[in-house]
Amino acid sequence: MLNNMWLEKNNGKIYEKEISKADRDGLSARLRNGKISFIYRPRLKDGRQIRITLGTFPRMSLKEARERVLELAQYVADGYDPRVKVKAQQIQNLTAPTFDNLFKIWFERQCKVVGREKHWRTYELHVQKEFGAIPYQELKRATMAQFLISKAAEVPDIAKRILGDLRMCFDYHLIAGTIEGDNILTGINARSLGIVKNQRTRVLNDADIRTLYRTMRFMDMNQKNAAILELLLFYGCRGGELRHTKRDWLDFEAMTWTVPPEFHKTGKKTKKPIIRPILPEMRHLWDALLEYSDCDWLCIAMDSKTAKSQRQMSGASLQDISRQVLIAASSKKFNDANGENPDWEPWSIHDLRRTARSYWSDLGEWAVCEKMLGHKLHGEADVYDRATYTDKMAVIYRQWWGIMKALEHGDENIVPLSRKRVV
């Protein structure tokens, strides 16, 4: 019977004749021209005896050769020719979709979220190089879990996005029949990765909003950014909803702004657009964006403070309006009554949404306020109630606009920045 000592002793040796040494279960080792090959000779159900070369020593060990024989022997016992099974497996391996194939197909067909380019960039930066060329069936749950755990420790928000996208990607291909088996990410969630969501609670108060207007009025901010900030504060909308807005989403006859389902967060579930009223007293904000834009997008990127482009404004540029422009400017340009810099706790674009909703609570019905945010109502309410509530929204928005202007003007008789002439 074969053993490792015989294999190591004879590997590389050249004899005049071919040498064959039997093992068990139809396995043998053949020594020819210094090369040892493992040979399997099973007898099929129809009486034929066939020969299959399993591999060469030492690339294949004796243990691996014996394990391979047991696999092939099962095919024989089931009535198959193992050579046909091996060939079919090789073809399947060659044509098996890679991780990259699966993600690209899912992204093009199914990823319709707002800001989808961010999801593709995350895949490129964090996942593609690591797993892109690997067939799905070669992926191991433990490997993916360790990868996600390490990402969660470094960049938890990115890890959550990766986990969500890949789980949806694999689910889609399992349903489509592209891959078989189970979703290897089933059971892995943000909590199991140790990701704890830090709930932001920042809400701008009256003094903060006054400082916001004061900063915009006296700093060198282009009118486009000023209009964007007022629209975000007024509508309490998500930044992506405004950033993706196109000209034809505005209807100045019906005085409505419509965000299609594919461009807002809950649209994938509700299949309904968000329709918000445009008030005559704040239409100038939309006019400011229209005047700056020479393309379909209303929120455009700027090549300089005065030079326009035909590119859509990026999500990072939108966030930077609060992070790098306003907050930094206020600390440099203004002092309070005591001659000190204003104590303005940092805030983000999304905090304007929370601010608007907090003020609305005293102005109208809860359900209407939730509709204004674009939230899905609890239970089956959205299924049976198809009303847009634009009239009721307008009542709340008009009161909110009055509050905003009162905070902006204070005791001063000034012209809002967004109403000044665009130069």
Image: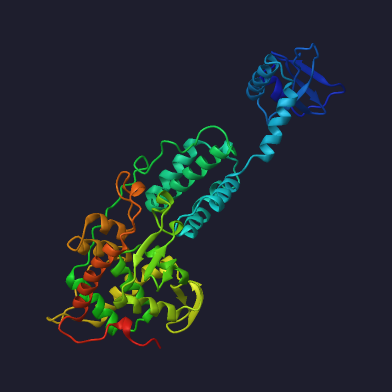
Q: Residue at x 41, y 77 (%)?
A: 289
Coordinates of residue 220 in the picture (x, y in percent): 34, 84
Coordinates of residue 205 in the picture (x, y in percent): 19, 68
**In what quadrant of the picture does the C terminus appear?**
bottom left
Which quadrant of the structure image shows residue 95?
top right
Q: Is residue 331 above or below residue 375?
A: below
Coordinates of residue 169 in the picture (x, y in percent): 51, 45
Q: Is residue 231 above or below residue 372?
A: below
Q: Residue at x 34, y 49 (%)?
A: 382
**408, 54: nearer the viewer:** 408
Say whether residue 202 is visible.
yes
Q: Residue furthest left?
A: 338
**In what quadrant of the picture does the N terminus appear?**
top right
> How are the colours assigned in the image?
rainbow
Coordinates of residue 251 in the picture (x, y in percent): 42, 71
Say whether residue 346 is visible.
no
- How many labels sit on residues? 0
- Left or right of 71, for residue 47: right
**284, 326: nearer the viewer:** 284
- Left or right of 2, for residue 252: left
Which quadrant of the structure image shows residue 58?
top right
**91, 282: nearer the viewer:** 282
Q: Residue at x 32, y 54 (%)?
A: 375
- Left or right of 11, for residue 118: left
Q: Is residue 252 above or below residue 241?
A: below
**328, 382: nearer the viewer:** 382
Q: Residue furthest right?
A: 16
